[in-house]
């Protein structure tokens, strides 16, 4: 058996797509409640297999400059593949850091458990390091797969519900500015403008892909109905908020009258409050459901009854993988000064991360360099990936044995310097 792992050519792009679950109409998410899904069922139905015309169209897209596919060939046949998308993520200190986003991954059932995905991941890591991307990330379709490649949850998301009858705001006076229901063409222009402001102020947020909002349409989508679009402008007429929502039809009485908010971003508190006041009091609705929202949603604190906003699903969101440890740690800011030595257990896929590192944080910035000093803490690369954006607890990771402190106060020190407020969040995947 001859195994070859390499980038694909345009002539091989359709074969690459054919190994991916979504293109075959196969499940592409594990059968468990998904916090990114707004429907009453646990996860959405698989799509129909892609047509030849769709595959040819997608084949052009996967050869774009920002898309970096790798594939596994066994005896000349393409049997598995994955890709990285070159993006940027907002790190603590609101600094953009280059990132390779892992996407479009699959190995056909007859060739699983043969190390092919590991080989593909290794090729993508090496390629990303060559492009100067110190971080990799993904949304894990199955929770048990990606930890062995060094990925670990770094952001969280929730799905919440709010009964319209319970959506009583503490302050009911109208917010300044204006609301408008708009068409998809207007929304396609509004989203990039709003998101560009949001991503520079939200740790964990991602730079969009070139076609991020190209699929917004006014056309109905089966029983989900048409997507609707809402924008808010401040008193000077400047756009400062946008939301996508839909009113799906349901034959079941308990799910009828549900308004699903699929996307929501606001750059001012007035826009945030005004849009939620409208969306939670829409005519002929009973309930609002919104998938993939931050755990620390401010809406809860605008309600007379904070319990009315019920979290019905919660899960990990972005999984992070540190590829170049000294570059990544020096690229972010920290909450206070620090002088820490951190030992990383053997990282076989990125051996340059293994060893003891001296992290020095001053008001001027951070430096990270190798050292022979005794470490203050030892951890695996997955634990450091979870800590990197500042949303995970070092104490919890230590309780699980993922971080091992070697001096009194070391755990408190790393918690103090790494945590951020509000928690990191990314509003979309890739």
Image: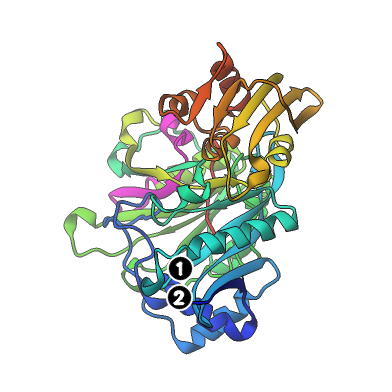
Residue 19: mark in rendering: 2
Whether 2 is among the magenta residues is no
Describe residue 397's horizontal placement relative to residue 418 as left or right. Answer: left
Q: Position of residue 68 (x, y in %)?
A: 64, 67
Q: Residue at x 56, y 42 (%)?
A: 271
Q: Element type at marker 2?
A: loop
Residue at the extreme top of the image, as rendered? 408
Residue 45, placed above or below residue 304: below
Q: Earlier in the sequence, mark 1 or mark 2?
A: 2
**What is the CA distance from the residue labelled 1 to the residue labelled 2?**
6 Å
On whether residue 292 falls in the magenta region, the answer is yes
Image marks 1 and 2: residues in contact by CB distance under 8 Å: yes
For label 1, the SS is strand
- Is residue 365 visible in this depiction of the protein? yes
Whole-percent x and y of residue 254?
19, 53
Q: Which residues are magenta?
A: 280-302
Pointer 1: what residue?
106
Residue furthest out toward the bottom: 52
| Looking at the image, residue 12 lies above or below residue 196 | below
Which residue lies most toward the left here?
A: 253
Tell how many labels.
2
Neighbor class of circle 2 (other Cα within 10 Å; few <14, some 14-19, many 20+) is many
Q: Between 202 and 380, which is closer to the camera in this rendering?
A: 380
Q: Quadrant of residue 171?
A: top left
Q: Please state which of residues 359 and 17 is positioned toward the viewer in this rendering.
A: 359
- 320 or 166: nearer the viewer: 320
Locate the C terminus by quadrant.
bottom right
């Amino acid at each position: 058996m001859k195994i070859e792992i390499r980038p694909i050519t345009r002539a091989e792009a359709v074969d690459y797509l054919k190994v991916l679950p979504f293109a075959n109409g196969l499940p592409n998410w594990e059968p468990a409640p998904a916090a990114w899904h707004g429907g009453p069922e646990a996860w959405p139905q698989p799509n129909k297999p892609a047509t030849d015309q769709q595959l040819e169209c997608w084949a052009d897209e996967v050869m774009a400059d920002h898309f970096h596919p790798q594939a596994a060939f066994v005896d000349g046949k393409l049997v598995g593949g994955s890709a990285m998308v070159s993006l940027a993520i907002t790190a603590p200190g609101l600094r953009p850091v280059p990132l390779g986003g892992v996407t479009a991954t699959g190995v056909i059932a007859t060739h699983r458990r043969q190390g092919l995905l590991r080989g593909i991941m290794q090729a993508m890591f090496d390629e990303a390091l060559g492009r100067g991307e110190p971080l990799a990330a993904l949304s894990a379709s199955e929770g048990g797969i990606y930890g062995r490649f060094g990925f670990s949850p770094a952001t969280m998301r929730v799905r919440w519900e709010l009964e319209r009858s319970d959506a009583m705001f503490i302050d009911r006076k109208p917010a300044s500015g204006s609301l408008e229901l708009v068409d998809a063409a207007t929304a396609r222009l509004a989203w990039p403008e709003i998101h560009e402001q949001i991503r520079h102020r939200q740790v964990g947020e991602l730079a969009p892909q070139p076609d991020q909002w190209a699929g917004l349409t006014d056309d109905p989508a089966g029983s989900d109905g048409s997507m609707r679009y809402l924008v808010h402008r401040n008193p000077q007429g400047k756009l400062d908020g946008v939301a996508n929502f839909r009113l799906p039809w349901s034959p079941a009485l308990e799910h009828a009258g549900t308004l699903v908010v699929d996307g929501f971003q606001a750059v001012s508190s007035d826009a945030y409050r005004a849009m939620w006041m409208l969306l939670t009091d829409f005519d002929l609705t009973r309930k609002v459901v919104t998938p993939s929202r931050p755990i620390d949603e401010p809406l809860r604190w605008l309600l007379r009854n904070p319990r009315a906003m019920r979290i019905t699903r919660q899960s990990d969101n972005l999984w992070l993988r540190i590829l170049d440890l000294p570059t990544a740690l020096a690229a972010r800011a920290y909450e206070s000064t620090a002088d820490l030595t951190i030992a990383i257990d053997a990282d076989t896929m990125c051996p340059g991360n293994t060893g003891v590192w001296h992290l020095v944080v001053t008001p001027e910035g951070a430096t990270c360099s190798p050292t022979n000093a005794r470490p203050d803490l030892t951890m695996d690369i997955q634990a450091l990936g979870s800590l990197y954006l500042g949303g995970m607890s070092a104490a919890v990771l230590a309780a699980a044995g993922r971080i091992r402190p070697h001096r009194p106060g070391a755990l408190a020190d790393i918690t103090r310097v790494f945590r951020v407020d509000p928690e990191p969040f990314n509003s979309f995947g890739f």
